[in-house]
Image (cartoon, rainbow, N blue to C red):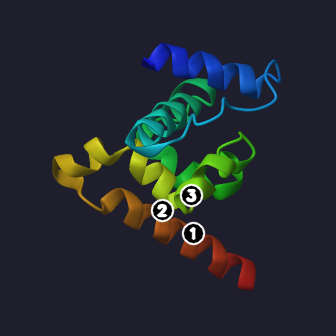
Amino acid sequence: MNREQVIDIYQDVLDKKRKRFPNYFFVGNEGKKYMRYMTRYLLEQRLSIPIHEIPLQVTAGTLWSHRLKPPAMLYGWNYYEVIDNAYQEDLNHGSSNKFLINIGMETKGKNELLKQ
């Protein structure tokens, strides 16, 4: 299945034209690739979040409220790992774990503010 077909299915799920993803949609490496397509579509196109702003704006709630929790749970992923899967090419081109470190620092900062 190509990227456009995956995005069409995801849009139908988000728009409630479809109750759920097709059976066996998230199996193996192909399913991880579909998660990558959907995560990038959600953040960059549907929510219009610039890549450099993702660590500041995206929370687990953002991903989970857009129907990405069930497939993430199939892989045993938390929201950091969903984002890492979607942006692994970007992470491997010099910035390495900087992206996830920023997410971790942002989360830590939010947690510290909540404690005060």
- In the image, what residue type sits under mark 2? Ile
The answer to whether residue 116 is seen in the rendering is no
Residue underneath mark 2: 103
Q: Disc 1 and disc 2: Cα gap in Å?
A: 6 Å
The secondary element bearing badge 1 is classed as helix
How packed mark 1 is, by other alpha carbons closer than 10 Å (few <14, some 14-19, many 20 or more), is: some
Q: Disc 3 and disc 1: Cα gap in Å?
A: 12 Å
- From this view, report whether residue 5 is shown above or below residue 20: above
The answer to whether residue 87 is seen in the rendering is yes
Residue underneath mark 1: 107
Identify which residue is drawn at 47% across, 71% down.
105
CB atoms at circles 1 and 2 under 8 Å apart? Answer: yes
The secondary element bearing badge 2 is classed as helix
Q: Which residue is the extreme one toward the front? A: 24
How packed mark 3 is, by other alpha carbons closer than 10 Å (few <14, some 14-19, many 20 or more), is: some
- In the image, what residue type sits under mark 3? Tyr
- From this view, report whether residue 86 is shown above or below residue 9: below
Residue underneath mark 3: 79
